[in-house]
Amino acid sequence: MRKITIAIDGHSSTGKSTVAKQLADYLGYIFVDSGAMYRAVTLFALRKGIISESHFDKEKLIDSLAEIQLTFKKNKEEKAEMYLNDENVEKQIRTLEVSEFVSPIATVSEVRKKLVEQQQEMGKEGGIVMDGRDIGSVVFPNAELKIFMTASPQVRAERRYKELLERGDTISFEEVLENVTERDQIDSNRRDSPLKIAEGAIVIDNSETNQEDQFHMLLQLAKDRIAGRV
Ligand code: CDP
Ligand code: CDP
């Protein structure tokens, strides 16, 4: 059976990674959460004092890029986890602090170039589901299936807030809502590879769709492409 490329882009906390992983598991494809890579670069920059509330030393970040090695390794449950220079940073990259600095980091073209090259290498054989912001537009413009996911900011912030509370983070709903809307704003307006609906992408608003229905809807779209029906 032919192996296709599935690109899932969209706004923050729309369930992109969840459905991308479900599809990859079902189809036996590679799953890549490209946001985890931008988050790992952000964690590196925070630790090195390259970015803070008061400053952002872009040149230093660019000069340090060669020191950053990103890899995904599967854990015992077969879930891919992010490694930064051989350190498992899966938990550290999901904090609100990293979320607050990741969008400025992702505006830097040199960062994007490095990560996009690595992402294209991972998907060169097809059989991949990757989620992010520029997957259908820049990373895999020829993907057989492109999805753009969105939902209301309120619903998205509620989903992310619940997730952070379950992890034990002490944050307010307002902080999460502010982060979600601020990232939408920066991601959609940056000069290099802004978040936009890629040509040929199917737009899905899942404000009122549960994950199960969402998965089945996308699986059908994928099966149609694999069978060459579309
Ligand atoms: O999961 P969540 O929606 O919070 O975001 P993410 O997918 O982990 O991505 C975090 C941030 O990385 C985004 O807000 C973007 O600034 C950046 N990103 C990007 O620029 N391009 C991608 N392909 C993926 C993420
Ligand atoms: O990757 P992205 O930031 O788009 O979202 P995610 O990390 O896959 O999902 C964010 C949260 O929303 C997770 O806790 C999902 O379980 C939840 N979610 C939901 O409750 N209903 C949906 N239809 C989609 C996601």
Image (cartoon, rainbow, N blue to C red):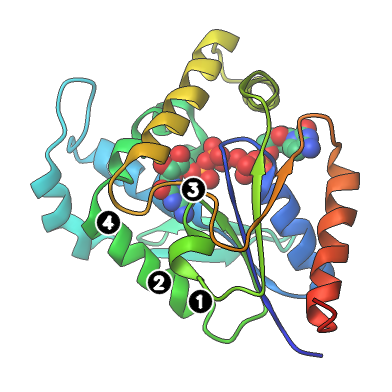
**Mark 2 to mark 1 CA distance (whole Å):** 6 Å
Query: Quick one: which residue is furthest to the bottom in this view?
Result: 1
Residue 78 to residue 203: above or below: below
Q: Nearer the viewer, mark 2 or mark 3?
A: 3
**Mark 4 to mark 1 CA distance (whole Å):** 17 Å
- Pointer 2 or 4: first along the chain: 4
Q: Is residue 223 left or right of residue 161?
A: right
Q: Secondary structure at mark 4?
A: helix
Q: Nearer the viewer, mark 3 or mark 4?
A: 3
Which residue does the numbered mark 4 point to in the structure image?
111
Q: Which mark is residue 196?
A: 3
Please state, as top left, top right, bottom left or bottom right, where the C terminus lies in the image.
bottom right
**x and y percentages locating residue 178 in the rendered image:** 48, 16
Q: Is residue 89 left or right of residue 167?
A: left
Q: Is mark 1 within 8 Å of ligand 1?
A: no
Residue drawn where x is 66% and y is 25% of the image: 152
- Pointer 2 or 3: first along the chain: 2
Residue drawn where x is 88% and y is 64% of the image: 220
Which residue does the numbered mark 1 point to in the structure image?
122
Q: Secondary structure at mark 1?
A: helix
- Report the amino acid beneath label 2: Gln
Q: Nearer the viewer, residue 217 or 76?
A: 217
Q: Decide: few, some or many residues near mark 1? Use Cα within 10 Å; few <14, some 14-19, many ≥20.
A: some
Q: Nearer the viewer, residue 167 or 51?
A: 51
- Report the amino acid beneath label 3: Lys
Q: Decide: few, some or many residues near mark 3? Use Cα within 10 Å; few <14, some 14-19, many ≥20.
A: some
Which residue does the numbered mark 2 point to in the structure image?
118
